[in-house]
Image (spheres, rainbow, N blue to C red):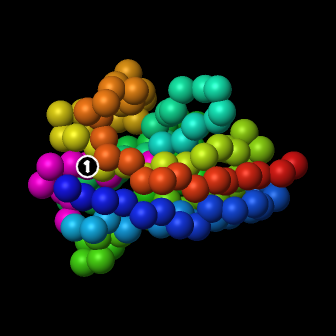
Amino acid sequence: HVELVESGGGSVQSGGSLRLSCAATENPYSDYCMGWFRQVEGMQREGVAVIEGDGTTTYADLVKGRFTISQDSGKNVVYLQMNSLKPEDTAMYYCAAVQRAFCYTPAAMNYWVDRSDFAIWGQGTQVTVSS
């Protein structure tokens, strides 16, 4: 099955930018859509952005206008460009290949995110935004 490797996290000051990358070992879109999620310790993992194979994207309200999800289909890579970062964006960010049955908006996905069959997950990358 598909495996995911993330990169690009780090520390940045408020207002700064970071780009996360997620490389899949194979083209995932026949069985999955691709998404970015984030989790603060002690809190539920939450959806941030989703992209389909045709390039259709959806975003959580908290990141609309600041974050952009994109893909390089030829390389099976998904990106999350994060601009105008805020301290409240500090979290562990996870790339996910979400099972097609659960491919809806990030807000809807939050209802299923803890299911064992929800997605294949990357290892996570920490993003820290200081004020």
Q: Which residues are magenta?
A: 27-36
> Could you tell whether 117 is left or right of 68 in the image?
left
Q: Is residue 30 magenta?
A: yes
> Could you tell whether 7 is left or right of 96 in the image?
right
Residue 26 in view here: yes
Looking at the image, the residue that sits furthest to the top is 111
Q: Where residue 47 sits: x, y (%)?
A: 46, 37
- The mark tally for this picture is 1
Looking at the image, the residue that sits furthest to the right is 131
Between 49 and 1, the one lying in front of the other is 1
Point 67% across, 54% down: residue: 127
Point 42% across, 64% down: residue: 5
Which quadrant holds residue 117? top left
Vertical placement of 55 versus 46: above or below? below
Q: Is residue 70 magenta?
A: no
Point 27% across, 68% down: residue: 25
Point 38% across, 48% down: residue: 121
Q: Where residue 19 sits: x, y (%)?
A: 57, 66
Quadrant location, the N terminus: bottom left
Vertical placement of 15 versus 71: above or below? above
Badge 1 density bin: few <14, some 14–19, many ≥20, Cα 10 Å: many
Q: Which residue is mark 1?
A: 33
Dot 1 lies on which element?
strand
Three-letter code, disc 1:
Cys
Between 42 and 83, the one lying in front of the other is 42
Vertical placement of 72 versus 119: above or below? below
Q: Where residue 111 sits: x, y (%)?
A: 38, 21
Residue 70 in view here: no
Vertical placement of 99 versus 127: above or below? above
Q: Where residue 21 sits: x, y (%)?
A: 47, 66
Looking at the image, the residue that sits furthest to the left is 30
